[in-house]
């Protein structure tokens, strides 16, 4: 049988203890290997809860009732060592994810690699590579607690990608980064290959430049999913999600693409501008 190279979520419902209504309601979705999926939605719509379930944090660390099925590349969360080994996870408040045991940024990145039993020379190479990717080369000798909020987010991402995960789950990973750091992060994300990425973000303009698909969460439900173009051309007003800046401009100017949709990213904007000249 062919190896299953998808993320499959089948009728997922989840409810925290002490609450009457579920925070996730009947989520169905599928992601092909190598895709970048952006998860958007208002506050309290269930984005973090979905990340927690898919990362296995619910119910391995945080307790909640969960119904339905989900598999990452054929693996179920019950198969925890294998499931855990294939995921890289950055949740909200990444400072809380630091081991608290490392004297330096380099040691923190090395932590999971040592646990994996990687050879010392390979560990050094991985540290240097992911530090460069996350713009932390100059901080490798610093104590993790001396980093700024944005740098801690970059360290958490570096640590998550150092193990070469099959699936990367990122919950609002740029919330504390400055504009340059955020731009560098999305530039890096655009070039990621061989990793399937689920990213919660409110940076809709950046997301539209790089995402293969977008999921919209509203009140615990996955109310829309598709390409950025399809999703942002069909936003319901009660989701209260703004269109990308480029789409808003095109709507004002009535610049539509050949298929009648408004552009959502720079490449599409260029296409309509070319057509209108
Ligand atoms: N540990 C918990 N116990 C009980 N309820 C919780 C818990 N964590 C989250 N909730 C509730 O679950 C709902 C969904 O929260 P969640 O954090 O998943 O939303 P979100 O879309 O990520 O929001 P935000 O954008 O503000 O982070 C909210 O109503 C929240 O109050």
Image: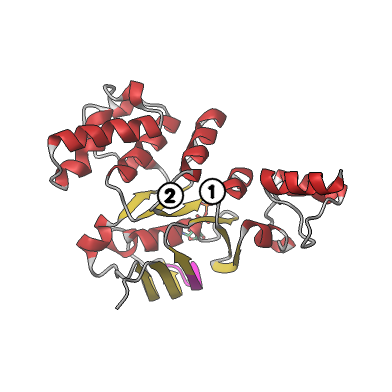
Task: Identify the mark nearer the N-term, 2 or 1.
Answer: 2
Residue for point 47% across, 72% down: 20
Question: Along the line of sight, which residue is nearer the eye, 101 or 85?
Answer: 85
Distance (Cα) linking label 2 and label 1? 9 Å
Question: Along the line of sight, which residue is nearer the eye, 53 or 269?
Answer: 269
Q: Is residue 226 left or right of residue 186?
A: right
Residue for point 41% across, 66% down: 16
- Whether residue 23 appears in magenta in the rendering, the answer is yes
- Whether residue 56 appears in magenta in the rendering, the answer is no
Cβ atoms at labels 2 and 1 below 8 Å apart: yes
- Can you say whether 136 is above or below 196 in the image? above
Q: Position of residue 209 (x, y in %)?
A: 60, 46
Q: Position of residue 112 (x, y in %)?
A: 21, 44
Q: Secondary structure at mark 1?
A: loop
Q: Is residue 69 left or right of residue 272?
A: left
Residue 21 visible in this rendered orientation of the protein: no
Return the residue at label 2.
Answer: 170
Residue for point 38% across, 75% down: 69
> Range of the magenta residues?
17-29
- Check the image and tell me how it is coloured: secondary structure
């Amino acid at each position: 049988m062919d190896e299953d190279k998808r993320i499959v979520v089948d009728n997922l419902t989840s409810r925290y203890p002490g609450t009457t209504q579920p925070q996730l309601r009947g989520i169905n979705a599928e992601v092909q290997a190598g895709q970048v999926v952006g998860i958007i939605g208002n506050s309290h719509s269930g984005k973090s809860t979905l990340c927690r379930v898919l990362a296995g944090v619910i119910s391995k660390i945080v307790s909640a009732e969960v119904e339905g099925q989900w598999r990452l590349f054929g693996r179920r969360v019950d198969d925890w060592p294998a499931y855990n080994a294939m995921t890289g996870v950055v949740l909200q408040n990444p400072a809380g994810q630091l081991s608290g045991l490392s004297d330096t940024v380099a040691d923190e990145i090395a932590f999971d690699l040592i646990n994996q039993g990687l050879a010392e020379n390979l560990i050094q190479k991985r540290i240097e590579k992911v530090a460069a990717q996350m713009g932390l080369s100059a901080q490798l000798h610093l104590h993790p607690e001396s980093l700024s909020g944005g740098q801690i987010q970059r360290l958490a991402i570096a640590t998550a990608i150092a193990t070469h995960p099959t699936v990367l789950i990122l919950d609002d990973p740029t919330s504390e980064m400055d504009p340059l750091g955020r731009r560098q992060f999305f530039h890096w994300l655009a070039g990621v290959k061989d990793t399937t990425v689920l990213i919660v973000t409110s940076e809709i303009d950046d997301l539209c430049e790089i995402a293969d698909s977008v999921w919209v969460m509203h009140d615990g439900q996955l109310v829309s999913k598709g390409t950025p173009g399809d999703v942002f051309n069909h936003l319901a007003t009660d989701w209260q999600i703004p269109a990308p800046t480029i789409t808003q401009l095109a709507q004002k100017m009535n610049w539509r693409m050949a298929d009648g949709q408004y552009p959502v990213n720079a490449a599409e904007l260029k296409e309509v501008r070319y057509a209108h000249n």
